[in-house]
Every structure is written in C-alpha cells, then in structure tokens.
Amino acid sequence: MDGNYGILCNSSMDTYGYLYNNTFDPAYPTMNILAIDDDSGGHYQFMFTIVLQTLSQYILVVTTFNKNVTGPFTITAVGLASVEFSRINISSISLMAVPTYSSVLTFNSQTFCHRTDNCLDSPFFYEALQLNISMDGNYTFLCNSSMDTYGYLYNNTFDPVYPTMNILAIDDDSGGNYQFMFSMFLQTLSQYILVATTYNKNITGPFTITAHGLAPVGFTRINISSKSSMYFREFL
C-alpha cells in the first residue's frame, strides 16, 4: 500500500543504511540512491522515514559505519501495511554489463540550440547516440567529463531543430559533479537516442558515458541529417 513507512535498524554495531530505487550496484554505490542514513534511529542506528509506492521496487542495503565489523542486526518496518523483506545476492549478472562510450565534443561537432531561444552568438555542441538495448530492464547512464554536461533521452527520433519533441528524460546534474545521469526502464523493441551536450554554449572537451544494467548496451554514434529528423525509421 502506498504511504509513509519507517524502517529502523537495531544492532550492537554502528550501522549505516542505504535505500535504492529499482537496482543496486555495489560497484557504483551512489547510483539510484533514494536515501542514506547513519544515526537517525539513535544509538548509532540508521532509520528511514519515507513515502513508498507499491508499483516501485526498493532495495535496502544494511552495512556498518566502520570497516571490517560483523554482528547481528534486526530491521523493523512500520507503516500502513506489512513490509516483506527478501534477501538478495547481487550476482555477476547485474554487474557484467558495464559498457562505456568515450568521445570528444569539438568545434566540428554537430550543433543545436537548447535551454535558450538565442543561439546566434554561439552554439551548443552535441553528440547523438543510438542505444541498442538487448533486454528489457532498468538501466542507468552516467556521464563523466571535465565539462558541465547536459543530457537528453529521446524516444524513436531526435530532431535538433525541435529538441523538445519525443523527450523521455532531461538531466543536468543528477550524476554529481555537474554530470547528467539517467535511470529508467528501457525496452528492446523501442528505439532510444541519447544526446550528450553541455550546459553552457561553445564548450568542447572529452566525455565518457557508462551504462549499467542487466545486459550490455550498444552505443552507435549517429549524424542527424535533415532526412533522419523528418521521418520515423523502423529498425528491422
């Protein structure tokens, strides 16, 4: 049942808790975080008070504040309905696919106008990537760059003349350090285009996009021509 829930840890250890949305990847523990807590429960115990929804998936990670500490613990959940706990082992299946795509925005990169109606003085450089999804599931795309990056995720097609059409998601700084990050459910029978650009105009530099999910993700760099932006193309 949707509603407010309290989740409290009780242990002789100094505990530390993380609450994640959809997936948890121990190799990238900052992804998909909903909440972090150390001592809100008193006596060095973590506690979460948060609104949870029945149609969402949540993962609670229990750990300790200090390294190399072991011991028993108990988790108590209080809310409008009962909460079931299922212990899961994060296997190599969830971590096997960590493909990356690296490139450089240059003064020869394609350009468009976003976040403003006036780009006559200088453009925004961008790169468009077709995402090849081999398995339905939750995926996270994180950009890493010295630039202040900005990302768009499109369904089916991307038209740089009309950058607000077909948008699935827009992000600026969810990845931290002025980097964009997307976390969402993607399907194999759909076509997605990721556009990597910058927050400010006329900025160039290298960037890397890392994909995390249940299966490998293929990146295909595409050049957006007038033909490709005018017509929907099905991939057989």
Image (cartoon, helix red, strand yellow):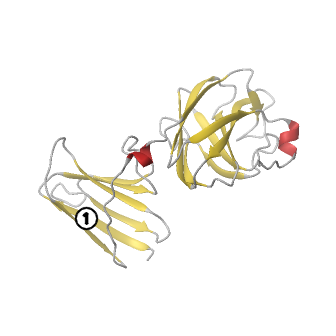
The image quadrant that residue 102 belongs to is: top right
Q: Is residue 197 left or right of residue 89?
A: right
- In the rendered picture of this protein, how many numbered marks are placed on residues? 1
Which quadrant is the N terminus positioned in?
Answer: bottom left
Residue 105 shown left or right of residue 89 in the figure: right
Q: Residue furthest front?
A: 236
Residue under the image location 43 percent in, 48 percent down? 93
Q: Residue furthest left?
A: 12
Q: Residue at horizontal 17%, vertical 54%?
A: 44
Residue at image location 17% in from the left, 51% down from the top: 14
Badge 1 local density, few (<14 within 10 Å), some, or many (20+)?
A: some
**Image x and y of residue 96, in percent:** 45, 42
The image position of residue 227, as x and y in percent, is 88, 39
In the rendered view, tell whether residue 134 sits above or below residue 205. below
Q: Is residue 135 above or below residue 3?
A: above
Q: Nearer the viewer, residue 212 or 120?
A: 212
Q: Quarter-wise, where is residue 46 in the image?
A: bottom left
- The residue that mark 1 highlights is 8
The residue positioned farthest toward the top in the image shown = 107
Q: Secondary structure at mark 1?
A: strand
Q: Position of residue 230 (x, y in %)?
A: 87, 45
Q: In the picture provided, is 3 more to the left or to the right than 189? A: left
Q: Position of residue 224 (x, y in %)?
A: 79, 36
Residue type, numbered disc 1: Leu
Rendered residue at 15%/46% (across/down): 69
- Quadrant in which residue 120 is drawn: top right
